[in-house]
Amino acid sequence: MNASSKVIIAIDGPAASGKGTLARRLAAHLGLRYLDTGSLYRAIGLTVLKAGQDPTNEAQALAAAKILNLDAFSAEELRSEVAGVAASHVAFLKPVRAELLDFQRKFAEEPGPDVKGAILDGRDIGTVVCKDTADVKIFVEASLETRIQRRIKELQDRGESFKERHVQADMEARDKRDRDRSVAPLKPADDAWLLDTSTLNADEAFAVALAHIQETGTL
Ligand code: C5P
C-alpha cells in the first residue's frame, strides 16, 4: 500500500474497454491527477513513425522513449489508430517499458499539493507500475464485440475513415500482443476488482466504480 496520505488508483484493461473515460471521470470527481499512460506509448510510437523508422526496432523505439515529449503531438494524433498500433509495438519492448517506469511512479507517488492523489490508466498499472502502492485496483473488461462497436463509433465521431474488418483485425492483433507479451502482459492484478462494462454505459460504469471506491474507504 501507499505510505503517503495521497491516494493512488490503478485502472487497467484492454483497448476500448471504457477505462480511459472512466479514469478521466473519476479523476475529475475525486480531485485526483490523471495520467493516461497509453499516451506515453502512443507518443513514442508516433515519434518513431515520423522519423521514418520502425516501431518494432528496439534501438529506434528506445531512442524515441528517451526524448519523449507529449506536447509534440495533438490529442487527435495521439488517439489515432495508427498511433495505437505503433504504441502496442513499442510497448512490446522491455527497455522501452523500463524507460517509462520512473516517470509513471513519480507521477503516482508525487501528484502535487493541490490534489488528493493520482489515478493512472493503462495495461500494467496494477501489476507493475503501482503493484505495491495502489490503494485501489480496477480491471475494466468488455466483450470483444462491444469493444469493436465502441471503437467504430469513436472513429465515426472523429470522422476517421476505416474498414470494419480492419478495426476488428487490429483490435484482435493488439489484444494478442498486449496479453501474450513476456514483459508486463495485460492481465488483472491478483488484488484487482473486475468491472465488466459490456452492458454498461459510461454513466453506469462510473457509478458502479465510484461506489466500489467508496466501499473500500479509500476516499
Ligand atoms: O490505452 P491505449 O489504447 O492508449 O494504449 C495504447 C497501447 O499502449 C496499448 O495497446 C498497449 O500496447 C500500450 N500500453 C501498455 N501499457 C500501458 C499503457 C498502454 O503497454 N500502461
Image (cartoon, rainbow, N blue to C red):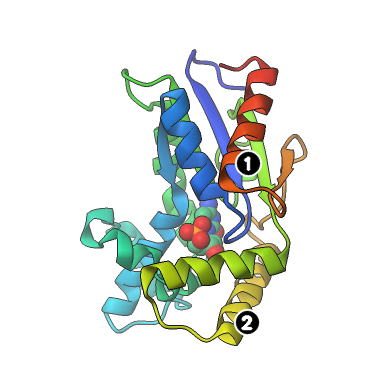
* Residue denoted by label 1: 205
Residue 68 in which image quadrant: bottom left
Few, some or many C-alpha atoms within 10 Å of disc 2 (few <14, some 14-19, many ≥20)? few
Look at 31% across and 59% down and name the residue there: 75
Look at 63% across and 77% down and name the residue there: 173
Tell me which amino acid carries mark 2. Ala
Under tag 2, what secondary structure?
helix
Q: Position of residue 37 (x, y in %)?
A: 45, 50
Q: Position of residue 89 (x, y in %)?
A: 51, 72
Q: Residue furthest right?
A: 190
Residue 180 in which image quadrant: bottom right
Q: Is residue 11 left or right of residue 80?
A: right
* Residue denoted by label 2: 169
Tell me which amino acid carries mark 1. Ala
Q: Is residue 197 left or right of residue 152?
A: right
Of the pair 66 and 108, the residue shown nearer to us: 108
| Residue 92 appearing in the image | no
- Mark 2 lies within 8 Å of ligand 1 (Cβ measured): no
Q: Is residue 149 left or right of residue 120?
A: right
